[in-house]
Amino acid sequence: MSAVGLSGVHLLLTYKCLYECDHCFVWSSPSSKGTMTLARLEDIIRQAHEIPSVERVYFEGGEPFLFYPLMLRGIELTRRLSLEAGVVTNAYFATDDRAADLWLRPLAELGISDLSLSTDSYHGTGEENKMVRRAKRAAQRLGIPVGLIEIESVEQLSCSAPKDESKGQLCFRGRAAAELAGKVKKRPWRAFDTCPEEPPKIGRVHIDPYGNVLFCQGISVGNAWEKPLKRIMSDLNPEKHPIIGPLIEGGPAELAKRFHVTPKRAYADACHMCYEIRCALRTRGAAKEILVPDQLYGVMSEDSRART
Ligand code: SF4
């Protein structure tokens, strides 16, 4: 596949977060390790700019506002290179209206095109929710395009009421697989014959503080600190990738079959099955350069890229 289809580069600026949400795909927490250095950050933004189809760079985590000067420098470079910039945050900084203005004004001046605020029952319904509302109002005052990311709760998932279309779908991968999958009704494993990410159309990748270029959380297609992003993407043939290939062919069910992993009888969703099969493969030491970093499998180490 060529890099032509890649339009979004999402930087996991840090794995660290003040919160430790049950639905977090990337197992972020206050004790998580791994933050991009300034040199790496500038390098990867320039690498993204070298791919003509890339239109936007997102700053995510973890919580990117924890490394505010780094994030601002990254946004500034992104804008200087005429790419769009977006930020995803839980708005922990919006302790009052003036503080929300103070933190967001520099982003408005740099001209970010999207501020996505995470708010739902997993992030907290008290002060956490109020901070998001404050940040939203501040963004509107400052003219920043702003939206909310609200994920449905397990209670909403389990009730028979019609789905609330304003809420995003809960996917059971990462910490969500460990903490929440046991709370919902399961379906037989054979039902999970497609991947919701719709490979081989790889329109975006996430890049973490260790350089891992991730098709999905925990599935690497290369390391941008070792090989230029442009080459990683142009060399990538999703059908031939040891993990993405089976997912294209027949979803997590095919992944289990291809690697001779005996599935459980039932799973919460396709991502739950995919995640558990990948955890089983890691235990066997299979695809160890691909199923990284440890952080995305809930293994907290000094250097999450090291698997040993
Ligand atoms: S099925 Fe696997 S690869 Fe596809 S979105 Fe879910 S976790 Fe990611």
Image (tube, rainbow, N blue to C red):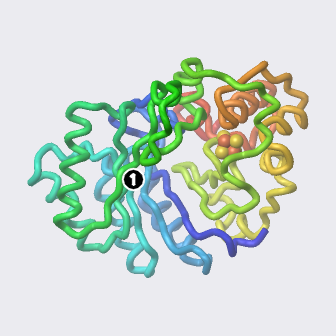
Q: Residue visible at 68% across and 33% down?
A: 275
Q: Residues within 10 Å of mark 1 (few under 14, many from 20)?
A: many
User: In the shown orientation, is residue 39 left or right of residue 232?
Assistant: left
The N terminus - image quarter: bottom right
Picture coordinates of residue 284 (x, y %)?
A: 81, 26
Q: Residue 85 location in percent, x, y? A: 41, 68
On the picture, is 70 further left or further right than 183? left
Image spot of residue 197 (x, y percent)? 66, 51
Amino acid identity at mark 1? Val
Is any atom of residue 143 visible in this view? yes
- List the residue tagged with mark 1: 88
Residue name at image x 67 percent, y 59 percent: 226
Relative to residue 218, is residue 168 drawn left or right? left
Residue drawn at 18 percent across, 58 percent down = 138
Ligand 1 picture quarter: top right
Q: Nearer the viewer, residue 69 or 303?
A: 69
Horizontal side of 26 relative to 269 (left or right) equals left
Q: How many marks?
A: 1
Foreground residue among 267 and 116: 267
Image quadrant holding the C terminus, namely: top right
